[in-house]
Amino acid sequence: MLPLLQFGSLGSPPSLLVGLVLVALVLLVGRFVMKVAWKLVVLAIIAVTVLWVIGILGF
């Protein structure tokens, strides 16, 4: 009963640690994915702009 009163509804320290490590991993992977996605968006903007200019010039 004492550990339940001590941590309330948060759970045990090992489960909190595992949860925080999982959140850190998700953030790390998300950061990498966003870095790649940002480069793809910039490349897509450049490609669409080039195709639009080529279309205007009639090539």
Image (spheres, helix red, strand yellow):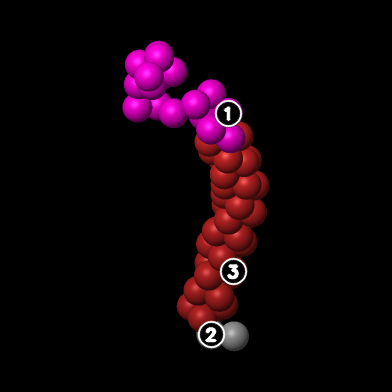
The image position of residue 12, as x and y in percent, is 49, 26
User: Residue drawn 57% across and 44% down?
Assistant: 26
Query: Which residue lies under the disc numbered 1?
Result: 14
Q: Is residue 55 above or below residue 7?
A: below
Which quarter of the figure has residue 17? top right
For the residue carrying disc 2, how many other residues have a C-alpha within 10 Å: few (<14), some (14-19), or many (20+)? few
In front: label 1 or label 2: 1
Residues under numbered marks 2 and 3 in contact, where contact means CB atoms less than 8 Å apart:
no
Q: Is residue 12 visible?
A: yes
Which quarter of the figure has residue 4? top left
Residues under numbered marks 1 and 2 in contact, where contact means CB atoms less than 8 Å apart:
no
The magenta segment is 1-18
| Residue type marked 3 | Ala
State yes or no: residue 25 in magenta.
no
Badge 3 marks a residue whose secondary structure is: helix
Badge 1 marks a residue whose secondary structure is: helix
Q: Is residue 36 above or below residue 11?
A: below
- Of pointers 1 and 3, the one earlier in the residue sequence: 1
Does residue 21 appear left or right of residue 1 in this picture?
right
| Residue type marked 1 | Pro
Q: Quadrant of the N terminus?
A: top left
The image position of residue 56, as x and y in percent, is 48, 78
User: Residue drawn 59% across and 85% down?
Assistant: 59
Badge 2 marks a residue whose secondary structure is: loop
Query: Which residue lies under the disc numbered 2?
Result: 58
Cα gap from disc 1 to disc 2, whole angstroms: 66 Å
Q: Which residue is at the far front?
A: 1
For the residue carrying disc 1, how many other residues have a C-alpha within 10 Å: few (<14), some (14-19), or many (20+)? few
User: Residue drawn 35% across and 16% down?
Assistant: 5
The image position of residue 38, as x and y in percent, is 57, 52
Numbered tag placed on residue 25 in the rendering: none
Query: Which residue lies under the disc numbered 3?
Result: 47
